[in-house]
Amino acid sequence: MLQIQVLKNNTEQVKQLLQVKNFTQLHLVDEVIALDDDRKKTQTQLDELLATVNQASKEIGKLMAAGQKQQAEEAKTQVANAKLQIEPLKASLTELEQSIESILFQIPNTPTPEVPTGKTPEENVEVRAGGVKPTLAADAVPHWDLAKKYNLIDFELGNKVTGSGFPFYIGKGAKLQRSLIQYFLDFNTQAGYLEYLPPFMVNTASAFGTGQLPDKEGQMYHMPADDFYMIPTAEVPVTNVYRDVLLKEAELPKKMTAYSPCFRREAGSYGKDVRGLNRLHQFEKVEIIQIVKPSESNTVLLEMVEHVEKLIQSLELPYRILRLCGGDMGFASAITYDFEVYSAAQQKWLEVSSVSNFESYQANRMKCRYKDADGKNHLVHTLNGSSLALPRIMATLLENNQHTDGITLPKVLQSYFGAEQI
């Protein structure tokens, strides 16, 4: 969440930046500032009363020892009257703090100056592109037909056992999925990322920490009996490793990678864009996360973009990198780069990765800080990216590499899969 002091010191600038994200509830900024002013006044009154009680309590003992009983009784009355005011002030202070936090949770992160204005994906800016779009034979088919032809994925079986959006990967389809996961993890660990295998459920505090709550509450699978949420991405549990942690400056950066299934309700999704592997309720993804000093986060963001780009290049897929406009960005992100690969059979671009810098937004929610050489505490910056999301990568690999006698795999996957083609 945004820091109160930032809102107070840069009120109009913050409002202008929030408008780049098409955030319309700008009155919340003024409301939270007013509430914080009330909080400070209440805190001052409480501190003064506590000081009065403390001082008077000391005087009572001295007066009693000196035999000045009347003065001591007057001091006791003063303490009793002050104490009557303390509890209501404490309750008021707690209520104000909760109201402030509740509003702050509703205000998204401000975008960086590099973020283009715009409301729709069509207004995202292409940064660069690479690879060559393949020319397929006239009888080429989309991945859902290839999956059926080679018995790789059973969508109907998933419908039977669970529901739409929960496919079964079978035989060589399951092996290709496993090969991709292992290759992505190896690629990341060789670049210095420490591998984690996190829990696939998180508590409410973790979901709030990374910004999924309250913004994405309706998109997450919730288990009320335990108040746990199925994770929408490994970003949530892995970033929360450092919730309520004070790091030493020498410990930074923290570089982490994790495989996990991801669970998303995807409410409101329908039509041709959700067919096959294009949009699922459960899918697999490998994530990279970094926790860094604020002065280094912009450089680290570009390094992470280059890392994901090299991974996609190694898969020999045509791709493009987009800088998202304000209206297409995530709630907690300050700047996001999307990667899309070209699906030749569907003749469309498919998003396979988002790489984002959250600056101090998540860190402020999680109370994740570091102590510098002078002993001062600072909020860290957090970043994460998909490296990579599997469904659309698999869809594109199957479609772009299909031939009459099978599906050829990229060279980097052949040793993992144990064959050159399916």
Image (cartoon, helix red, strand yellow):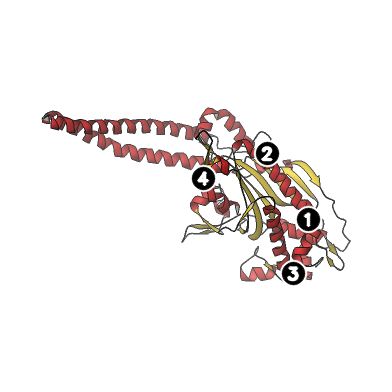
Q: Earlier in the sequence, mark 4 or mark 3?
A: 3
Q: Residue at x 46, y 39 (%)?
A: 100
Circle 4: element type? helix
Whether pointer 2 and pointer 1 mark residues with C-beta atoms closer than 8 Å, the reply is: no
**Residues at marks 4 and 2, CA–CA distance in whole angstroms:** 23 Å
Q: Circle 2 sits on which residue?
A: 299
Whether residue 100 is visible, yes or no, is yes
Name the residue located 66 percent from the left edge and 50 percent from the top edge.
Answer: 192
Query: Where residue 191 appears, x then y in whole percent?
Result: 69, 50
Q: Quadrant of the C terminus?
A: bottom right
Q: Using the rendered view, name the quadrant where residue 125 is placed.
A: top right
Mark 1: give few (<14), some (14-19) or many (20+) Cα within 10 Å: some
Helix, strand or loop at label 1? It is loop
Circle 3 or circle 2, nearest the eye: 2
User: Above or below — where is 166 with respect to 35?
Assistant: below
Residue 20, label in figure: none
The amino acid sitting under disc 4 is Met
